[in-house]
Amino acid sequence: MKQKAHIKFQLNGESCEVAFAPHKTLLEVLREDLALTGTKHGCELGECGTCTVLVDGRAILSCLMLGLEAEGRTVKTIEGMAQGVELHPLQETFADLGAAQCGYCSPGFLLVADELLEKNPDPSREEIKEALSGNLCRCTGYIKIYEAVELAAARKRGEEKELPHECLFGLD
Amino acid sequence: MSQNGSNKKPLNVVGKPFRKVDARAKCTGQTKFADDIVLPRMLYAKILRSHVAHALIRNIDTSKALALKGVIAVVTGRDLPIPYGILPVSQDEHALCIEKVRFIGDPVAAVAAIDEDIAFEAMNLIEVEYEQLATISSIEEALSVDEPRIHEYGDGGNIHKKVSLEFGDVEEGFKEADLVHEDIFFYEGSTHLPMEQHAAVARFDVDQKLTLWSATQTPHYVHRALAKVLPLPAAHIRVIATPNGGGFGGKSDPFNHELVVAKLAMITGRPVKITLTREEVFYCHRGRHPVLMRVKTGVKQDGAITGMHFQSFLDGGGYGSYGVASTFYTGALQTVTYEVPRYKFQGLRAFTNKPPCGPKRGHGTPQPRYALEVHLDKIAEQLKLDPAEMRRRHLVKPNSVTANYLRIGSMGLGTCIDKVVEGSGWKTKFSSWDQAKRTLAPGKGIGIACSSYICGAGLPIYWNSMPQSGVQLRLDRQGGVCVMCGSIDIGQGSDSILAYIVAEILGIDPFDIRVVTADTDLTPVDLGSYSSRVTLMTGNAAIQAAERARELLVLAVAEKLNIPIENISLADRRVFDVEHPETAVSFAEAVVLAESKFGTIGTVGSYTPPRSPGKYKGAGVGPSPAYSYSAAVAEVDVDPATGIVVVERIWIAHDIGQSINPVLVMGQVEGSVYMGLGEILMEEMAYRANRNIVHKFPSLLEYKSPTTMEMCDVKTYLVEDPDPNGPFGAKEVGQGPLLPVPPAVANAVYDAVGVRIDEVPITPDKVLKALKEKERGRSPRFGPDSVPEVAWPEPLRVLTPDEGGDGREMPRVAVHS
């Protein structure tokens, strides 16, 4: 008797078919059956936001969603964020500001921020905090992440904004 | 060539906010962490952990697990009988417990199976028969209960270590004082909580050589532990530390799971992976020690300290870990911020049946720093002095030696205080201990605290006279530069630091350089990412290697272009004559010339810290090549109805010596503020039930840590007071800026609502209790009232440098009654 389930869905802009043990979470299917290890895990209980991916444009915790539920849907992971070698504006600003320190929580933060900017191109600092409040980061104190999201938002809006001196060098 | 790269040439890379060399990988999900490694025919391991806190193991039956289809191997403690531990004096752990378990979570047996689900099922089929022993759950209990002993070694009963040191005559100091003040504090334990769970993969090759990939901050020590325990010749073992998804000290011990997967790989001949669950990470712990502290200080009217007596009592948990060092650290750095002419320290670490404590960011120093800075705030109030000014007035002098023989180099704390005082508007906001002069709204308050931290430990963990850090550099004829170093990037940017420094000296772009790190087969030893040592030590080693390579290039180019050596400069990927910049060769051509003249170009550099002036027993903890300094002002809003403390903003100034990359320094400062905020407001490694030995909440949801909603605004100032021992003058930033945050917040809470919370964390219930006490006209305080009675050994007495001491202890004199 065959033990595996088989689904078809859109993954990072490409059609994808995969077979896996039916009890597996989307997180496990992505990491173990599709070798997309960019999606990380911090608790596998829906507590830390680390495993966030976008499903039909919405940020979800892939550790709380069964792989089977992805059937026919559109999934975006960190591997699908850059266009070829061209980084997404959020990836650029995260890199420039050191918003990714150890980098383990970064895929989750980037995808939540991606969803935020798609819905709200000009979020306030408070709106950014609210949007990112389900994701834990132990390295940055979140501040470089806020600054990176704000800068990426400005650039996506077509504004020519430079990195604020204070963010890079501190106050005088 | 000048020392430490300080050769006055304008800096092109150092001090600039470059990206990290691995920034793109980390922002695209390409960085390979330990759990991302998959090898053909790989097995999965699970470790059965004890569900009892203190017990003898009577029997382990693995037969049902072995019989399960898909299980390839099961091991128990008998398969790994050799003990290990991070410190040579505390070799008290086994990869799997053999006769005894000491805390809930202690490893007992392990299985390897073809998939994780089968491994989990098999683990649950292992039957262990325990004979339970009485448990020890607190410092007080450890001191009063000698039997059963958790360990058969230590300073008697359940005391792991007792320390007693006196520098100068402290009683004499108290006699000279205008005020002698005493306080008692408690600092609760907390854990690192890295987002990445520990993981490791082992492979035993057909050629009988072992490779271990692991999320470790200390590949060199893991290498040594594997060689000892397996046992295998060290030369047959390769340890590759994978980029750490956060460490904060929690991945600094060699761990049982690393030894277990290595053994399972050797038994099965197949690669074996283990990834701990979040719950297991809580049991691994090695985090902040809960510390009870008593501090007594004599001061003159102007706040000048005449003598200090500090006592600390550490709850160590079930094993030694770094605990002996942690104990010394709770007494070492009280002397490096303000002048302390006479100083006495007594410290004690107890074994308890809880997960072992060890080094967490600031290792053993946030607890005493919190105590000291709140204690000084209380003293300032009694003397009616501005606490910022009082601190500013009595700073340790640069280039001096403290009473306990720590050599201070650069010291930028005065500037740090000035920056945060000015930036925060301290002079208008602080109440000057007079309610009538308050300018802040009711419930709002402001507080200040300062601190200092080491830039690497002066001595290695195991005694040896070799360098603490080595760097190898290879230049190839295409102009490629490869820098190799044993250091491991845990997110702080240590890989990038190597590239920046080599690029600066060789006049190339940091992104021209390939960085190979943390692989014991390929890279020279660096002791690891702990004690804030990496930038200073690898940086100095990198400078030496790069200067040596530079010299070869200069000699070859000078000969070719027929210009004097001293005229040659390297910048913008060119090697040129400073007087005629058009007379030049490209960097790649320079390498070709050098390789033609000298053969293959490879250089090495290494770093050994300077010798410390302290020679007394116990002088090994505290000395450092340099000390970083921080000052912080916190502004809080306390709701007297709920007791909830909201930290609105923290101004922090950090003396970094010289930023190698300011944006990375900023990130470390902000991250440290965040972690300090978590410790002062909410984080606790708390236990409950069954005599307080069951972890209260081993999950990310219920172990409270700050989210974006709790994180405060941070205003950062970088103060650059270069230290002669630092690479380009650089000092540490990874740990120091955490230290002033908890006491600054505690002092601000007092300013806001007039209650002293002498116990960390400051949770709403404690604030409310203290406010109630205040209402009733009692001491407006929450905190411990006493410390246990202890028969301390006669202190080891050391004359201070001011008293003409030579750094050695005085001979013990028999006391006649």
Image (cartoon, rainbow, N blue to C red):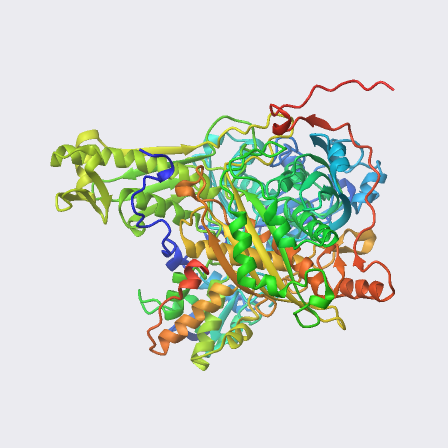
| Number of numbered discs overlaid on the protein picture | 0
Work out which quarter of the rendered image holds the N terminus of chain B and state it. top left
Decide: is B770 above or below B67: below
The structure residue drawn at horizontal position 16% and vertical position 34%, both measured from the top left corner, is: B558
**x, y (%) of residue B59?**
76, 41
User: Which residue reaches farthest bottom?
Assistant: A119
Please name whichever residue, A135 or A156, is drawn nearer the observer in this view of the structure.
A156
Residue B428: percent from left, percent from top: 61, 65
Image quarter (top left, top right, bottom left or bottom right) of the C terminus of chain B: top right
Res A43 quadrant in image: bottom right
Q: Is residue B597 above or below residue B141?
A: above
Q: Nearer the viewer, residue A19 or B671?
A: B671
Q: Is residue B171 left or right of residue B729?
A: right
Q: Position of residue B513 (x, y in %)?
A: 31, 47
* Front residue of B413 and B611: B413
In-image side of B688 versus B698 (left or right): right
* Residue at the image point whose x is 45% and y is 59% from the top: A170
Kindly tell me whether residue B564 is visible in this rendering.
yes
Location of residue B359 in the rendering, given as x and y in whole percent from the top left corner: 61, 44
The image quadrant that residue B319 belongs to is: top right
Near-viewer residue (A149 or B62): A149
Q: Is residue B367 above or below residue A13?
A: above
Q: Is residue B121 visible?
A: no
Relative side of A79 to B260, left or right:
left
